[in-house]
Image: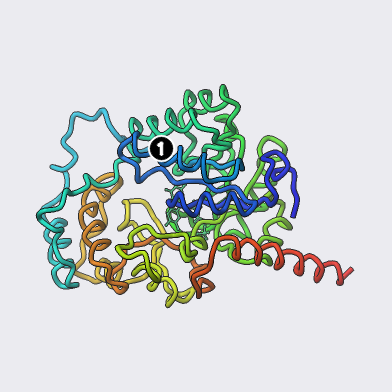
Amino acid sequence: MHTSLSEKFGIEYPVFGFTPSEHVAAAISRAGGLGVLGCVRFNDPEELEAVLSWMDENTDGKPYGVDIVMPAKVPTEGTSVDLESLIPAEHRAFVDRTLAELGVPPLDSGAEHATGVLGWLHSVARSHVDVALNHRIALIANALGSPPKDVIDQAHEKGVPVAALAGAVEHARRHVANGVDIVIAQGYEAGGHTGEIASMVLVPEIVDAVGDSAAVLAAGGIGSGRQVAAALSLGAGGVWMGSYWLTTSEYRLGSASSEGPSAIQRALLGATSADTVRSRIYSGKPARLLKTKWTDAWSKPDAPAPLPMPLQNLLVSEAHQRIAASENPDVVAMPVGQIVGRMNEIRPVAEVMDELVKGFDSAVSRLDSFR
Ligand SMILES: Cc1cc2nc3c(=O)[nH]c(=O)nc-3n(C[C@H](O)[C@H](O)[C@H](O)COP(=O)(O)O)c2cc1C
């Protein structure tokens, strides 16, 4: 499993793993892939600084990357309007009523409440870039558009390549025109924000459109060596996986206990590939989520239409914190892709990587036997 991309990054396998957990990201890099830490959850640059120092120490000198969220088209700040005042009372009442009906308790009144996720604000995402570029990162990836030109230039000045997700061929063309080095062609099956075109169609379309101007990673629905082989057959230089790492033993986010699978993991382990929905309720933009009682409530006839980004983020921010604290697998608000149907046991990252490599080898041998 060697490609020009694995060579460029000095990694054993062209497996790029997006994850919000530093423990998973470090384990992916140690196992021979490139762990990419999602930074959107860090409101405080000092916390990110401490986590990246930990990554520097715990990756055995191997490369890793970071992922930021700088939406290209969403006014994230600078507006004189009080965004909270734009949220209709009907929406707030629906969220309160739904949480009560689902038995999700209020947050502990004594505890200090987080402000909610602010990492999608350009000012906060810029602080992520500033912090990350002082560490030995090998990649900056951006969700929801190309990063602004000065951010791309800032990364390039430090010799760090920039990647961006694309759900359609025109996004890929725009990224290349904006100076992005790696296009992540992410199909409809993927967890999180996703477009309407399946990976099988999208990946070769983007590979052909960008030609030699950028490398392409295939994303969406990858969780086995066979699927890695398929992605490379479609012309990608590597794969970018997100969902599959959520059921690794290193993933401990959102769990109060250090023993056994978290509520989120228990919900994922029981889900089939049919148990996801693509909905705007998570952030205001279409994102694929695990289907739970929370997502079901939003598809009932009495539910209001989700608000545009960033209003929906603001609306559900506290609800997401309450849901996470309740640790109830039936009421989870969690992005995940259709590959969830293959996520049936909790395993260490190294075991997952080993299986990807072995599965890739046997898929390639099988194809070879057809010649
Ligand atoms: C829990 C979760 C959170 C995600 N958050 C982000 C994010 O903050 N930034 C981003 O670029 N992509 C994010 N994604 C998308 C992944 O980067 C990746 O493109 C996607 O998971 C690939 O498809 P797969 O889920 O089928 O592996 C997220 C995906 C998941 C499952």
Mark 1 nearby-residue class (10 Å; few <14, some 14–19, many ≥20): many
Q: Is residue 188 left or right of residue 301?
A: right
Residue ID at (24%, 70%): 297
Q: Mark 1 is on which residue type?
A: Met
Residue 238, x across and y down, in percent: 66, 51
Can you tell which quarter of the image residue 137 is in?
A: top right
Q: Which residue is mark 1?
A: 70
Residue ID at (43%, 52%): 21
- The outermost residue toward the right is 371
Residue toward you, 136 or 221: 136
Residue 307, x across and y down, in percent: 25, 51
Residue 332, x across and y down, in percent: 31, 67
Residue ID at (85%, 67%): 368
Residue toward you, 63 or 223: 63
Callout 1: SS = loop
Q: Quadrant of the N terminus?
A: bottom right
Residue toward you, 365 or 179: 365
Q: Quadrant of the C terminus?
A: bottom right
Q: Is residue 148 left or right of residue 41?
A: right
